[in-house]
Amino acid sequence: MLTFCSPAQQTHAPMLELVNGKAEEHAETPARLANMLAQMGAVREPADFGLAAIHAVHDPAYVAFLQTAHADWLAAGREGDAIGYAFPVRGRRPLDLERIDGRLGQYGFDTVTPIAAGTWAAAYGAAQSALAAVEAVASGEARHAFALCRPPGHHAGADYFGGYCYLNNAAIAARAAAARGLGPVAVLDVDYHHGNGTQDIFREDGSVFFASIHADPRTDFPYFWGHADERGAGDGEGATFNQPLPRGTGWQDYERALGKALDAIAAFGAKTLVVSYGADTFADDPITQFALTTEDMQLMGAMIGAAGLPTITVMEGGYNVAALGRNVAAFIAGLESA
Ligand SMILES: [Zn+2]
């Protein structure tokens, strides 16, 4: 599998997240990437495609905030990672605030997504990896390409960060693929968690189909998105397809849901597939509650490959570091077997 990864992606190293009532070691570590790279063989460094494709998805004011947030934090006399502590409740008017603490609340939605010294460089590098994967498929160099993104992206919206995500690599890839003539594009999100950012970005956009299989948000992060009755709006009505599944879900039920998602993608008429792949559906993941095995990851890849579409996969979550590279390799082996 032609795989892209930028060395800058290692520079993001948040220390702590505030979760479960205490400050815990951050789950989204550079060790994740190291474990995946060890299983990958050769990976290619992406070219620099610039900010244009990022601005095609994200509000430029939000991107500018991300670029300087950590420096602004230090300038306010703080040390360590920037973490917000005050968030506007629903219905508060939009404000352009000066103080870094206000801006962290303005653009963030949780306390588990610190902005560290290397965050912008890593998020930018991950987005470039996704764009390089698109370019490889668009140019005909490869039918499938893999962007080994870190930090992940699917929880980031057009103007917000959260869920360990800052730039939405899948959405950036989908927009870029459409711009390169690969549309219509479908995004299939198979991370354990709902891809709320991707859903929000394409909510009113009927040109991109979004299908997600994830833990029921009644019990799991991100709680406020991903319910079965969210189907898109306006021009995007019907182009969002959510399948929340209960904790403990194993391959038999997962396979059925994946079949339905792929049927819906075929019915939409997608010509290109962007997959948000998270290995946190793994039974032994420390922060999630599904029951898939490494062998199931291969079956998942094979089913997706059998859809027969040019496929750009971007890496999302997966927090069992020791098993991560193995699970990714199994998924890729399945995808390539089709
Ligand atoms: Zn996840």
Image: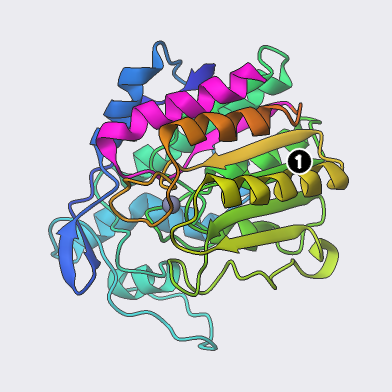
Left or right of 248 on screen, residue 232? right
* Residue 299 falls within the magenta-colored stretch: no
Which color mode does the image show? rainbow
Query: In this orientation, does residue 10 appear?
Result: no
Quadrant housing the C terminus = top right
The x, y position of residue 257, in whole percent, is 66, 51
Residue at the image point whose x is 27% and y is 76% from the top: 85
Labels in figure, total: 1
The x, y position of residue 198, in whole percent, is 60, 55
User: Amino acid type of disc 1?
Assistant: Val
Determine the image quadrant of residue 199: bottom right
Query: In this orientation, does residue 254 appear?
Result: yes
The x, y position of residue 139, in whole percent, is 72, 16
Q: Which residues are magenta?
A: 310-338
What residue occupies the far front of the structure in this picture? 252
Determine the image quadrant of residue 32: top left
Count neighbours of disc 1 (C-alpha within 10 A) and say few if under 14, some if 14 to 19, many if 20 or more: many
* Residue 320 falls within the magenta-colored stretch: yes
Residue at the image point whose x is 45% and y is 62% from the top: 247
Looking at the picture, tell me which residue is in the foreground, 322 or 238: 322
Looking at the picture, tell me which residue is in the foreground, 318 or 198: 318
Left or right of 333 on screen, residue 23? left
Judge: label 1 CB < 8 Å from ligand 1.
no
Residue at the disc numbered 1:
185
Residue at the image point whose x is 44% and y is 39% from the top: 124
Left or right of 135 on screen, residue 233? right
Quadrant housing the N terminus = top right
